[in-house]
Image (spheres, rainbow, N blue to C red):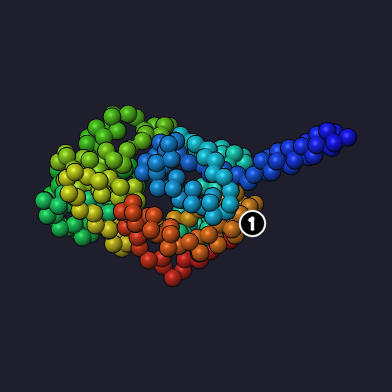
């Protein structure tokens, strides 16, 4: 009788343990397989670290779901339920629900300290004089280089940076560390990049580099404003307002911790505009 009682008790305890294990909450986060310094499959990017922090604050186990092509991952991963959260999306992105911004940054000019280039805005003489300027196609940097008449000058150089691959119907990746190293090595005088994408490589460069945030007052030749400062949020599916609320609370309560992580990366942080509100 005692033996059967112990067996029943053991079975009950075992069933309870299995239930707890099965119900352990998981936070599935969509991350790039190799889009440094944001994220990679080894968890070395700053967005990997932010995702870990968010999961810990939610009391969940982090599970990463990696994508390779940024053009379709929201449609093919988030919308189909393969992940719950996307780090590092533009605040107000209409494809999903976005949290209150957790940081704001801007595009930067990068040059060698020893060159002493006076790079303050798009009228800076150094932009007219530079032989080579590294930038990512399709970015505001390209738009403004067109506006100041330097885009065509850089066409052959851009083809070289892309390894002479055609951009038609395919994703051509421009590595941020390579673009920064173009300046560090002297192959280009200036690079124009999104600050968070460049900060890690500017900070760790063996050649001292200068990174200057570009003022957010740029205009195209037709007078249309070109945005250079952006706020970044966390995204969830449009029907997941409950998770959105939890994430907004984490951002509000943990802002100091989040900023410390970003500052350790060397990311230039800007004040949020007064209009920045929670995206619900």
x 58%, y 52%: residue: 59
Report crowding for label 1: few under 14, some 14 to 19, many 20 or more residues within 10 A (C-alpha).
few
Q: Can residue 223 be seen in this view?
A: no
Q: Does residue 140 appear to the left or right of 279 in the view shown?
A: left
Q: What element carries label 1?
A: helix
The single residue placed furthest to the front in the displayed view is: 2
Residue 169 point in image, percent of width and height: 43, 32
Residue annotated with mark 1: 242
Residue 237 point in image, percent of width and height: 60, 49
Q: Which of 172 and 32 is in front in this view?
A: 32
Image quarter of the N terminus = top right
Q: Nearer the viewer, residue 7 or 138?
A: 7
x 75%, y 40%: residue: 13
Q: In this view, does 48 lie above or below 210?
A: above
Residue 263 point in image, percent of width and height: 34, 57
x 85%, y 36%: residue: 2
Which quadrant would residue 41 be assigned to in this image? top left
Q: Nearer the viewer, residue 180 or 247?
A: 247
Q: Is residue 178 visible?
A: yes
Image quarter of the C terminus = bottom right
Q: Which of 223 and 124 is in front in this view?
A: 124
The single residue placed furthest to the right in the displayed view is: 1
Residue 195 point in image, percent of width and height: 32, 52
x 32%, y 38%: residue: 175
Q: Does residue 61 appear to the left or right of 127 in the view shown?
A: right
């Amino acid at each position: 009788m005692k033996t059967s009682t112990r067996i029943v008790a053991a079975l009950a305890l075992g069933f309870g343990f299995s239930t707890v294990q099965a119900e352990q909450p998981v936070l599935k986060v969509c991350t790039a397989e190799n889009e440094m310094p944001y994220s990679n499959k080894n968890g070395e990017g700053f967005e990997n670290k932010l995702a870990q922090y968010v999961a810990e604050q939610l009391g969940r186990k982090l599970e990463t779901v990696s994508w390779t092509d940024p053009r379709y991952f929201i449609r093919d991963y988030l919308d189909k339920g393969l992940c719950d959260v996307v780090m590092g999306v533009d605040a107000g992105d209409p494809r999903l629900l976005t949290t209150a911004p957790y940081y704001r940054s801007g595009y930067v000019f990068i040059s060698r300290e020893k060159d002493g280039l006076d790079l303050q805005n798009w009228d800076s003489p150094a932009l007219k004089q530079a032989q080579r300027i590294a930038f990512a196609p399709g970015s505001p940097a390209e738009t403004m280089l067109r506006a100041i008449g330097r885009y065509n000058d850089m066409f052959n150089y851009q083809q070289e940076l892309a390894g002479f691959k055609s951009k038609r119907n395919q994703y051509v990746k421009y590595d941020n560390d390579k673009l920064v190293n173009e300046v560090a090595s002297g192959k280009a005088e200036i690079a124009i990049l999104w600050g968070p994408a460049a900060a890690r490589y500017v900070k760790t460069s063996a050649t001292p580099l200068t990174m200057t945030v570009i003022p957010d007052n740029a205009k195209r030749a037709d007078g249309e404003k070109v945005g250079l400062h952006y706020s970044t949020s966390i995204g969830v599916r449009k029907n997941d307002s409950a998770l959105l609320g939890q994430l907004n609370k984490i951002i509000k309560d943990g802002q100091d911790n989040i900023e410390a992580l970003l500052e350790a990366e060397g990311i230039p942080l800007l004040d949020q505009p007064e209009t920045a509100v929670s995206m619900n």
